[in-house]
Image: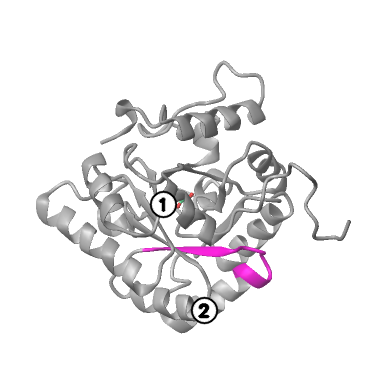
Amino acid sequence: MSAHARPAGARAPVTVPRLHEMKAAGEKIVALTAYDASFAALCDAAGVDVVLVGDSLGMVVQGHASTLPVTVDDMVYHTAAVARGVRTALLVADLPFLSFRDADTALRSSARLLAEGGAAMVKLEGADYVLEAIAALARRSIPVCAHLGLTPQSVHKLGGYRVQGKTKPAAERLLADARAVQDAGADLLVLECVPAALAGRIRSELAIPTIGIGAGADCDGQVLVLYDMLGITSGKRPKFSKDFLAGRGSVLEAIRAYAEAVRGGAFPAAEHAF
Ligand code: KIV
């Protein structure tokens, strides 16, 4: 068997085209964050489709009050660790605060996440001036996941971690931003903390898959912060999350239960949506 051959019965690696096929087929995409090789290997073994090295690591791993202190070096370090644990899931890495402030900086930061970290896709928050970076990355065949709604790197401007797109003008702006990131070349879109009805409208209008977190069930997939869904986040667990480890015997069982609940439509329930 060559170094690249896949054992019989093993899951095929999840690719960007595969995510598009899943949307077209109505198959839910299961995503979860991970920050090290051991948890990444459990996500992979549980059949998670997308493993995201989120800059949420600044809060849940490093203990900061926000994601703003996270650096590109931090992201490269954690992405490389996660890459050693992942075999089949698509590995997405966050571009941290100001690491995509212009197209050139975005290209340099992303090159590190792909070449040194082993990521297959980068994620970046926002639209507006960010569209140039998305287009520059897409033109160079670097897959991009956009992130709209509650964008934690803008926490000071937003005035806290709040649900976005609640008024009609704000909802229209979010829908326009979603179209714009798709048109700029994004392959995937995370929608964080937006009303479920708005997320459903965006999902049906876009050709690219949408992954929700606090965005209701009508998205093409779901993502959670791993530590939230294991019930080990300090402080109050967000309304949109659920402790899947409660009543289960292992982390692997908890992640399997999450994957099954997303694929079967049991998570998120109405109580997890806005
Ligand atoms: O940083 C992160 O973990 C994220 C997810 C919450 C989507 O962006």
> What element does badge 1 sit on?
helix
Query: Is residue 236 shown to the viewer in this render?
Result: no
Image quadrant containing the N terminus: bottom right
Q: Is residue 103 above or below residue 231?
A: below
Image quadrant containing the C terminus: top left
Q: How far apart are marks 1 and 2 (CA)?
A: 30 Å
> What element does badge 2 sit on?
helix
Task: Specify whether residue 129 is painted magenta.
Answer: no
Residue 196 location, x and y as percent? Answer: 26, 40
212 left or right, relative to 120 = left
Residue 237 location, x and y as percent? Answer: 42, 31
Mark 1 Cα-neighbour bin, 10 Å: few <14, some 14–19, many ≥20: few
Residue 263 location, x and y as percent? Answer: 48, 34
Would you name the residue on which mark 1 appears?
A: 24
Relative to the observer, which residue lies in front, 204 or 56?
Answer: 204
Residue, far left: 168
Task: Specify whether residue 117 is painted magenta.
Answer: yes
101 left or right, relative to 78 = left
Would you name the residue on which mark 2 appears?
A: 107
Residue 10 location, x and y as percent? Answer: 73, 44
Residue, far right: 1
Query: Is residue 84 shown to the viewer in this render?
Result: yes
Name which residue lies at 65% across and 53% down: 13
Residue, far top: 247
- The amino acid sitting under disc 2 is Leu
| Front: mark 1 or 2 | 1
Relative to the observer, which residue lies in front, 40 or 263?
Answer: 263
149 left or right, relative to 260 = left
Relative to the observer, which residue lies in front, 176 or 75?
Answer: 176
From which residue to which does the magenta span run? Answer: 113-125
The answer to which quarter of the image holds residue 177 is bottom left
Mark 1 vs mark 2: which is more N-terminal? 1
